[in-house]
Image (tube, coloured by chain):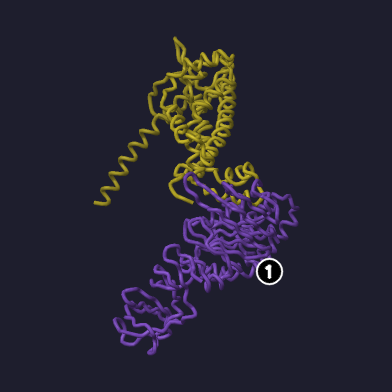
Amino acid sequence: MKKLKLIVSLIILTFFSLFALFPIGYIFAVSFKNNNSFQLSSFQIWTDSSSFDNYIKLFTETQFPTWLINSLVVSTSVTLFGITLAAFAAYALSRFPLRGGPTFLLVLLSTQMLPATMLLLPFYLLLSKFGLANHYLGLLIIYSSTALPFCIWQLKAWFDSIPKSLEEAAQVDGSTRLQAFFKVILPISGPALAVTSLFQFMTAWSEYAIAAIILQDSELFTLPVGLKSFQASLATEWGLYAAAAVLVSIPAVLLFTLLSKALISGLTMGSVKG
Amino acid sequence: MASVQCSHINKDFGQHHILKDISLDIKSGEFLVLVGPSGCGKSTLLRTIAGLESPTQGDVLIDGKSVVHLQPRQRGLSMVFQNYALYPHLSVHQNLGFGLNLQGLPQVEINSRVKEVAELLQIQHLLDRRPKDLSGGQRQRVAVGRALVRKTDLILFDEPLSNLDAALRSQMRFEIKKLHQITGSTIIYVTHDQVEATTLGDRIAVLNQGVLEQIATPCQIYSYPNNRFVASFIGTPEINFLPGKFFGRPEAEVGIRPEAICAKEDGQLEAVVEMQEYLGSHYLIHARINGFALRFISEHCIPEGNNRQIKLKVDMAKLHFFDKATGARIS
């Protein structure tokens, strides 16, 4: 009976694993094809006719390198800017008794309930008024502000779980409140900062709708907007599209791998005291 | 060494009046223990002296200078926290050297002072470990070391032994007392354990519901408690109270310490034995006298056990009288 259960579990797990892995294998296979075909005659990732031509073309004949740099600049800036703001705000909300603090936190969270598409027009009008449309700074402000409430909540939960006596000990030992924050609280907040940074980075890295509205100049495109330009009205360059999709996923995979240890402890943060 | 004066300290948390007009004068080099039941305000008073809480009213003076507007780092004191508050991301060596680093001392000086304190507390072999790799007792030593290494004139202890088991607590009590003798620093020590208070303190300050009930030497507190609360809080087993009319007061109580009573054939009081507890070196006898419960200490077990009628003799010189309404001592 136990063995049967195990076999059934294995079959189900294999089925769903294949289901999840199939699109990834498919996109790899398409990226190595030269005939610009989205249909595969056989499901082989690498065949005799496969080559790296699409990848080479991507870097030599398209604006992909520019978009890649743009995306990296925007995502990294959003992450650094957002995490700095979120860390200070979360620490203040966690440690200082603010009048109406809990209400403020609820209001902050309620902003996450508005769909991004609903805010597209107001965002665009606001940025146009300040001359920030078609500008990275506009994108940076929008990405940071929309991700901020969730990040503040996430980090506040972490700071709440850190005993206040740690900062108090640092203060008695001779540090200012700010030194205690930088020398004691931040160094032990690695898991929380990793999860929150990853959330910020991934939000900015994969966002399309806002970037497509704000950025009009192809020199300024981020990867999702740039990739969309491969879809022409007459012919879509599926090979290029697939190769770009593979490359776009690399930073995310690398980040997840690098932060995996911190992520595991970060995802369970607050569940165990101490 | 530093002297500390607390002058008319009041502390409110919202509607709650935690400290009520507390005035204390702690001499330079003294070991003062703040003792009282949970929630009496002893930790709040200590944190007010440390600068981690601001008094609603009143002043704190260290060496005659008001420090009430100074940050904790500017008060020239160190503190041992109840949960040790060791920095989890730093090694024991870095924990000990944290405050010295902030002072900007050269690394050679820091290493030498860390080594000196580590030897004093016998934690040299733990210097490279992280707090999570230490036992409760070892963490406690590191926390004490972190306070000692800065060589401050005033050290505050906030229930530092409450997380240790009984044997370790007794050992650390002895070591803290010894450290006080070596360093000569002024120590203010908070505990709810009256045994810690009486064994460690040069003087004890007993607090109850935010009020300073009495401050005196352990012997004075035990022998001449100011009021009913102090008499009942200090002393194990607890003092017995019997109602009666004394000194012409219709509503009064007499307090009799358990060791002031003994079973004797020629005793003045008749009692019935209810239960006998074996405590190793002696027995604690629970008896009843005219319906009132009474505990006393006996070297031997009462033969023929419970429900036996016995006669008790009371040392009349060791009686304490209290007003029943106010609880104040009647001299």
Q: Position of residue A156 (x, y in %)?
A: 50, 39
Residue B118: name its quadrant: bottom right
Give the residue furthest to the bottom: B265
Q: Residue at x 59, y 45 (%)?
A: A187
As drawn, A78 above or below B162: above
Q: Residue at x 60, y 50 (%)?
A: B58
Residue B116: name its quadrant: bottom right
Give the residue furthest to the top: A234
Give the residue furthest to the front: B248
Per the image, label 1 sits on a secondary structure element best described as: helix
Q: Amino acid at mark 1?
A: Ile
* Chain B drawn colour: purple
Q: Residues within 10 Å of mark 1 (few under 14, many from 20)?
A: few
Q: Residue at x 43, y 19 (%)?
A: A117
Q: Which chain is yellow?
A: A
Residue A181: name its quadrant: top right
Q: Position of residue B210 (x, y in %)?
A: 51, 55
Asked whether residue A258 appears in the rendered view, the answer is no
Q: Position of residue B221 (x, y in %)?
A: 54, 70
Q: Nearer the viewer, residue A81 or B182?
A: B182
As drawn, A28 above or below B50: above
Q: Nearer the viewer, residue A194 or A170?
A: A170
As drawn, B103 above or below B326: above
Q: Nearer the viewer, residue A219 or B28?
A: B28
As drawn, A9 above or below B96: above
Q: Residue at x 34, y 39 (%)?
A: A14
**Residue with the mark numbered 1:** B182
